[in-house]
């Protein structure tokens, strides 16, 4: 189960080329970036620009190398198509990809010309550091309702982004460097799209939230952003049997050297086809620290205050682990196996305490109890810790998404006892247009959340006074988050 849990959840080099001022032209369909002109899609309400390179293709000698400067181009680049998906294996009905040349981003803005520079929000997608893509996130709501510039970015995943090897100096965190290269692109080009490079918010969910933690802990990210939103990716997330949710560079290098790829040196590894590397793709699920881009474990950086001190919004969903447990056990788990499974994860000494605190409910299926245990112990209370620890040195706000009837955005999921409720990633269809139907109450909540995220990007305040705001249709109110998730029990037990 430990391996299954890991699978289920699982500063860049400076650009030294001559900088060309980035400016907008004409009706706004064509924008001159620092590398060349791009032509996007313009409607009556929004503009979108896709597939804009922010770094050179990470192929050949650039495989497992910090991102290099993108080449300039002549003429006008077609930006009417979204960025491609980075190489990955299929997960949760996300299609596979063998595209290694994937360091591109997308920009969405309101159609009308900006009267003053707009706040910029840079979205870092989730997917356990092994899957996902920028193009999955339709940012029109956030852009048009908040008068903001939204940038969604790709970064190398799995074996391409987080592979380590003794022959690769400073390896294991190339995906984090990719994110910083995109943030540097934003600094150079935000004004051309009507944005304010002096007011950039990074935000992300799941692995994207953990990526925000990594950027908060990275000295090389200084000055590249000014606010941060962590969604379901607390900086000190751990799962049963783990000491940390992050890996040291040394451990990642050992892991890379142990893979059955048939190579004795880096030159051979760089010559391997994408398909061969994808055979070990899901082994590399977390960034490495002890690297130049990430010198300290973000969990330690959070505890010791070695984080960029910017306003931060930190939140989670009320039932994070229902989705993850269904991925591990798609069929019923008899309640008679409950204690054995808990003991296998938390140890015999703690099993009785946990089972007593989280008893079975008699429905014949232990998966809902296991999900509640994992939600509280590995997600909610570490989210609470992130708020408490970051809040010692910076302004921190909190939320919990609690809508138990939100639509499921992942197709073909199995039945789950009691339903999935506010599952991991369930807030996303209220922020981005996933094409799923929302009730009038959910649409009202969506408008509230979009406005709160935009207000935070403008001012550093989401607009509520409570330490943690509960977000559900008809129930937007403060909540005693730590008591609800029994964080006192987990801090004393674990």
Image (tube, rainbow, N blue to C red):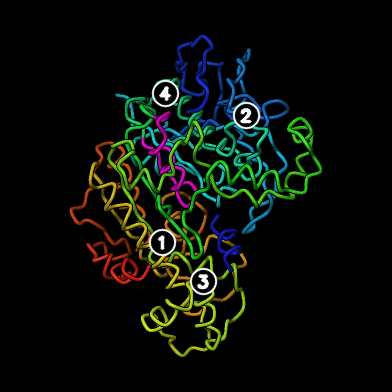
Neighbor class of circle 1 (other Cα within 10 Å; few <14, some 14-19, many 20+) is many
Label 4 to label 1: alpha-carbon separation: 33 Å
Q: Which callout, 3 or 2, points at the residue further toward the start of the chain?
A: 2
Residue placed most toward the observer, 412 or 300: 300
**Residue visible at 61% across and 21% down in the picture:** 77
Q: Are marks 4 and 3 in contact (CB under 8 Å)?
A: no
The disc label shown at residue 65, or none: 2
Where in the figure is residue 221, as x and y percent of width and height? 41, 30
Q: Are marks 4 and 1 in contact (CB under 8 Å)?
A: no
Label 1 to label 3: alpha-carbon separation: 16 Å
The disc label shown at residue 187, or none: 4
Neighbor class of circle 3 (other Cα within 10 Å; few <14, some 14-19, many 20+) is some
Does 207 lie within the magenta span? yes
Residue placed most toward the observer, 274 or 448: 274
Residue placed most toward the observer, 430 or 393: 393
Where in the figure is residue 423, as x and y percent of width and height? 46, 65
The residue under label 1 is 379
Label 4 to label 2: alpha-carbon separation: 22 Å
Which quadrant would residue 98 be assigned to in this image? Answer: top right
Which residue range is magenta in the image? 201-221
Neighbor class of circle 4 (other Cα within 10 Å; few <14, some 14-19, many 20+) is many
Where in the figure is residue 413, as x and y percent of width and height? 59, 68
Label 4 to label 3: alpha-carbon separation: 45 Å
In the image, residue 482 above or below residue 264? below
Of the two numbered discs 4 and 1 in the rendering, the one whose residue sits closer to the viewer: 1
Asked which secondary structure carries label 4, the reply is helix
Of the two numbered discs 3 and 2 in the rendering, the one whose residue sits closer to the viewer: 3
**Residue visible at 52% across and 66% down in the picture:** 323
Which quadrant would residue 7 be assigned to in this image? Answer: bottom right
């Amino acid at each position: 189960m430990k391996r299954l849990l890991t699978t289920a959840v699982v500063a860049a080099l400076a650009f030294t080329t001559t900088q060309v001022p980035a400016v907008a032209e004409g009706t706004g369909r064509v924008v001159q970036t620092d590398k060349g002109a791009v032509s996007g899609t313009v409607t009556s309400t929004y503009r979108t620009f896709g597939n804009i390179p922010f770094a050179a293709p990470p192929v050949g000698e650039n495989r497992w190398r910090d991102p290099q400067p993108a080449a300039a181009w002549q003429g006008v680049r077609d930006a009417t198509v979204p960025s491609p998906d980075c190489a990955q294996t299929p997960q949760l009905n996300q299609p596979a990809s063998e595209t290694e040349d994937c360091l591109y981003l997308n920009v969405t803005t309101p159609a009308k010309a900006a009267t003053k520079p707009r706040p910029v929000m840079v979205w870092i997608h989730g997917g356990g550091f092994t899957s996902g893509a920028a193009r999955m996130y339709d940012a029109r709501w956030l852009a048009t309702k908040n008068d903001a510039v939204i940038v969604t970015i790709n970064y190398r995943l799995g074996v391409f982004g987080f592979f380590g090897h003794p022959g690769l100096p400073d390896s294991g965190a190339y995906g984090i460097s990719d994110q910083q290269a995109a943030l540097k692109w934003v600094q150079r080009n935000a004004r051309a799209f009507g944005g304010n490079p002096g007011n950039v918010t990074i935000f992300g969910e799941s692995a994207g939230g953990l990526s925000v933690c990594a950027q908060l802990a990275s000295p090389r990210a200084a000055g590249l952003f000014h606010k941060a939103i962590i969604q379901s990716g607390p900086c000190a997330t751990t799962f049963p049997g783990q000491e940390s949710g992050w890996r040291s560079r040394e451990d990642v290098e050992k892991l890379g050297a142990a893979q059955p790829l048939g190579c004795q040196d880096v030159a051979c590894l760089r010559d391997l086809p994408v398909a061969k590397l994808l055979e070990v793709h899901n082994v590399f699920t977390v960034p490495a620290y002890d690297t130049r881009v990430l010198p300290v474990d973000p969990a330690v950086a959070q505890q010791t205050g070695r984080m960029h001190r910017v306003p931060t919004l930190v939140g989670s969903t009320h039932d994070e682990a229902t989705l993850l447990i269904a991925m591990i056990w798609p069929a019923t788990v008899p309640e008679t196996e409950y204690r054995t499974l808990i003991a296998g994860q938390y140890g015999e000494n703690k099993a009785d305490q946990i089972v007593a605190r989280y008893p079975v409910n008699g429905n014949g299926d232990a998966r809902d109890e296991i999900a509640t245990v994992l939600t509280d112990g590995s997600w909610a209370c570490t989210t609470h810790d992130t708020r408490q620890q970051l809040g010692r040195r910076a302004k921190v706000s909190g939320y919990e998404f609690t809508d138990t009837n939100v639509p499921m955005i992942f197709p073909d999921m199995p039945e789950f006892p009691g339903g999935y409720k506010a599952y991991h990633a369930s807030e996303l269809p209220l922020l981005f247009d996933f094409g799923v139907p929302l009730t009038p109450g959910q649409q009202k909540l969506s408008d509230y959340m979009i406005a709160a995220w935009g207000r935070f990007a403008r001012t550093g305040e989401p607009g509520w006074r409570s330490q943690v705001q509960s977000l559900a249709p008809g129930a937007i109110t403060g909540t005693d988050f730590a008591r609800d998730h029994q964080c006192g029990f987990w801090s004393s037990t674990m």
